[in-house]
Structures are given as structure tokens and as C-alpha cells.
Image (tube, rainbow, N blue to C red):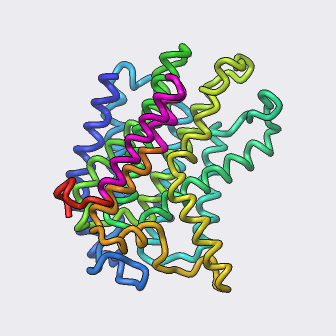
Amino acid sequence: MREYLVTVLLAAIITYLITPFVRDLAIKSGAIAQIRSRDVHVEPTPRWGGLAMWLAMALTLVIVNYLPLVEKSFGREATGIFLSGTLILFIGMLDDRFDLDPITKFAGQALSAGILLIYGVQILWLPINGITTLPTNIGQLLTVLFVMVVINAINFVDGLDGLATGIVMICAASFFAFSYLLAVVNGLNRAGAPSLITAIVIGLCLGFLPHNFHPAQVFMGDSGAMFLGLLISASAITLTGQVDASAITEENGGNVLLPLLLPFSILAIPLLDFIMAIVRRVKAGRSPFDADREHLHHRIMRLGLTQQRTTIVLYFWTAMFALPTVIAAFMPIWIAFLAGTVIFGISILLIKFRQVMNIS
């Protein structure tokens, strides 16, 4: 555990130090988010935060390769995740600079998922009539779809300063806790790609957030949102691949199925907001890709909350789903329910009573 904490701190420090230089590079290169009708920010802001994260990840991997435990996490799957992340970062940087069309971005996301398949990162089984080993082509298709859904969910939620960064950090922390505890409880290898990648993601977000929280000095852009989404989805798939499906029983089945369910439970809020937006726009006779100011964060802000407070409320709502899901895997369900209820209660206090925390 100490080595993973070192990994988190290294990634955070390097990201924090590199981000200002990447910000200057984005300004010089014209990768700047202008003001659009649906946006909340009021000044043009440089993007390419994903480049700072990628550089920090690369440097962190070079350094932690010398740690005895973490060094064992390096392998074919970790290499595939890094290469796939590099491609999706490049596509995101092009989009941040030139505003690529959706079809081009989807194609790039699918190609990045294809790299994962080449390096063995693939959904191998599903809980259908017990445990069903998937045919190779079906598993590959589901892998690509899973990766693309998670990537776009993270990209979709990036609507306020620091919102996506904080949500991904909560997601990564929850996933790291789950993967590490699962390894301890079930005797799996603690030095695996899921723990390594999620530990790095925690550090990347932790180091980037001071530059990204309102008022943001730099945005992560599509380069950062898609990069982080790919890392989270790949970690989930890799963890299921480390579990021996033939050894799953009714008693332990619930725990090992959670890796695929956890990203969806954590991303429940943005996924729900996405579905509501599609239904709302199609019902109004508009394209589902048309922008509007009816997203969840827009509605919360209309209640009189500042951007900072709205972001923190959505952090709590993310934790409301993430923490109980992890707790339920290892503790009685009532404890998970209690934790979720307490977190939800705090978020309501933040909405109803502006004096509870002096963050307005």
C-alpha cells in the first residue's frame, strides 16, 4: 500500500508542476475554449490539460518502475493501456484545437479500444445463467462499447470548472479501494495493472484540480476527459480478466462482478443526465447533439448556488453511489445504505442552507 501511496503523490506533484507549462503551450497553439451559449465560464480558457496528465503519467511510470511491488504491475496489459491512452490523448488534443466532428472522435475511440484488444485487455465473461465465457468476437465488441460509453460519460460531465476532475478522482479512488480489497480478501495479486493505473489517475486528478477548480486556469478538454475515461474503463476490464471465472461461486460472485458495474454506478449521475438530454432534445424535434442549458448542473445553479457549490454537490452525489457500492462488496448492505444516506443528506444541506459551508 505504501508504494501505491508514493505513486499517487508522485503523479500529483508532477501534474501540478507540469500543468502551467502545458497551459502556456495551449495558449500559444490556439487550443483555447471560446465562450459558447451553453458554457458557464465567462473567459476564454486554454485546454490540453490532458497533455499535462499524460506527461505526468509517463514520468510516474518511469520512476515507480523501480519500486519492488509496483514494478510487478508492469506487463502486457499496462503497456496496452498506456499506448491506447496515448492515441486517445492525441485525438483529444486535435479536437481541443480543431473541433473534430463526432464521427471522427467515435472512430478514434474505437481504434483506441482496439489497441486494448491487441494487448489482451478484453471482457472475457458475463454473469449470464451463472458465468458465461464469451466468444472472442462478442467479447471484443462489448469491450469496445464499454470503453466508448465510459469515455463519453466522462467527457459529457465536463461542464463546470473542476467537475469532471473531481468526479474521476472519486471514481478512481473508489475503484482502487475495491481492486485492492478484492485482492486482499480473495488472495489475488495486489500488484496488478488496475491498482497501478487507478493510483496514477488519483494522483493526476489531485495535481490537476488546483489549476482546474473555479476559477479554472486551464481545462482538461477532450484530451483529458477521453484519456481519463479510457484509463478507468481499461482498469475495470483488466480487473475482471484477473479473476478466474471458473472459481466463482454464488457466495463470492457478487464481489467479482462489481468491476464492470462499478464505473456505471459511479457515473450514474452523468449517464442519467445524458439520457435525459437525448430524450429532451429528440422530443423537442432537435438533434440529440444540439447543446442546451438544461443539464443537471445548470438546473442546480438556477437554485441560486454558485459554480463552486454546485460542483461540490455533484461530488457528493457521485460519492453517494461510489462509496456504498464499494462498501456493499465487503460489508453488510445496511452499512452501505447508511453511508449513502449520510452523503445524500450532506448534499441536501449544501443546497438548502448556504451558510453550512462558507464556499459561496
Q: How many marks?
A: 0
Q: Residue at x 35, y 56 (%)?
A: 313
Q: Please state which of residues 37 and 230 is positioned toward the viewer in this rendering.
A: 37
Q: Where is residue 66 in the image (x, y as percent from the top left)?
A: 33, 26
Whether residue 93 is visible to the viewer of this picture, yes or no, is yes
Q: Nearer the viewer, residue 59 or 96?
A: 96
Vertical arrangement, residue 17 with respect to residue 182, above or below: below
Residue at 54 percent of width and 52 percent of height: 268
- Above or below, 241 against 168 in this view is above
Residue 212 visible from this viewpoint? no
Magenta-colored span: 321-350
Outermost residue, left side? 358
Residue 284 included in the magenta stretch of the image: no
Going 36% across and 42% down the picture, which residue do you hit?
Answer: 202
Residue 8 relative to residue 266: left or right: left
| Magenta stretch, main secondary structure class | helix
- Front one among 49 and 294: 294
Please identify the quadrant where the C terminus is shown. bottom left
148 relative to 353 in the view: left or right: right
For the point 79% across and 45% down, the residue is 138
Question: Does the stretch in magenta take in 339?
Answer: yes
Based on the displayed image, in which of its 4 quarters is residue 57 positioned?
top left
